[in-house]
Amino acid sequence: MKYALLTFGEYYKLNKVISLVVGWDIGIAGKITERYAPMTPELTEQNGQLKCVIPISAEIQENHADLLTGVELVNSYISVETEEVVPIDGVIEPEVIDWTLNHYEAQGVDNSNLVTYIAGQDASNYPPIPNVGEWCEAKVYSYNGDKVKCLQPHTRTHYTPEETPALWLIIPTVSGYPEWVQPTGSHDAYNTGDRVLFEGKNYESLIDSNVWSPTGYPQGWKEI
């Protein structure tokens, strides 16, 4: 057994590819969920960055070496415990996102981080929502400039996604946070929960009446 240390995005992709090759996928009506590696991976640290650990069996190495092109394997790693949110780096194909979301939902695992990633993507990355009378798969579609996740495969009715929340989850498209601007007083200071972009990174204010920058008073901000 060896291990690949990957970003979350790389982990999702490789997990899906290996799972399908070895014949594991979501069962009937999403009640059974099988996949090569867990949806919530173990974490380690590599070069100061958190990485997801995916085990690579000898059978995969021998019979499916083509799936591991460009993937560096290690013999061991040190597991780390952290509450830090690991970013989903890189572009993830819509079909990988759909497969991952379906597995999360079948397991009852929180998928808010992945949904947030989807929200930041352009709606044109996803196929348009099917027309009335057409079949809707359990996947993400573009819809009115936003995205919607089909929660239950069905033939689309004349009702809109807004009118059928049991069938659709609307994922609004969000843009980046506003640039941090030096407040001039309490009237335009940042408050708890306000989010900004500062020197290429996103931060959330931890205090009210925050007139300091994230570097000027680090205790008043957390990076997100």
Image: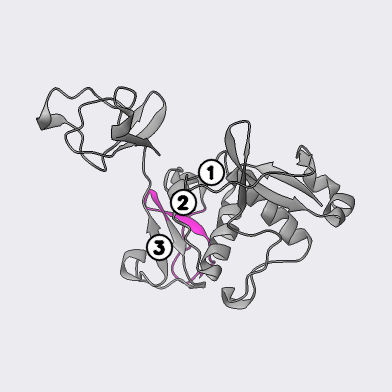
| Numbered tag placed on residue 169 in the rendering | 3
Please name the residue shown 53% across and 60% down the image: 101
The residue nearer to you, when weighing 174 against 191, is 191
Placement of the C terminus among the 4 image quadrants = top left
Q: Residues within 10 Å of mark 3 (few under 14, many from 20)?
A: some
Q: Residues within 10 Å of mark 1 (few under 14, many from 20)?
A: some
| Numbered tag placed on residue 88 in the rendering | 1
Q: Residues within 10 Å of mark 2 (few under 14, many from 20)?
A: few
Circle 1 SS class: loop
207 left or right of 88?
Answer: left
Earlier in the chain: of badge 2 and badge 3, it is: 2
Q: Is label 3 or label 1 in front?
A: 1
Q: Which residues are magenta?
A: 127-147
- Residue type at mark 3: give it: Leu
- Callout 2–callout 1 Cβ contact below 8 Å: yes
Q: Is residue 69 magenta?
A: no
Earlier in the chain: of badge 3 and badge 1, it is: 1
Earlier in the chain: of badge 2 and badge 1, it is: 1
Please name the residue shown 74% across and 52% down the image: 55
- Looking at the image, which residue sits at the far right? 62
Residue underneath mark 2: 113
Q: CA distance from mark 2 to mark 3?
A: 15 Å
The residue nearer to you, when weighing 109 against 76, is 76
Quadrant of res 214: top left
Q: CA distance from mark 3 to mark 1?
A: 21 Å
| Numbered tag placed on residue 54 in the rendering | none
Magenta residues: mostly which secondary structure? Answer: loop
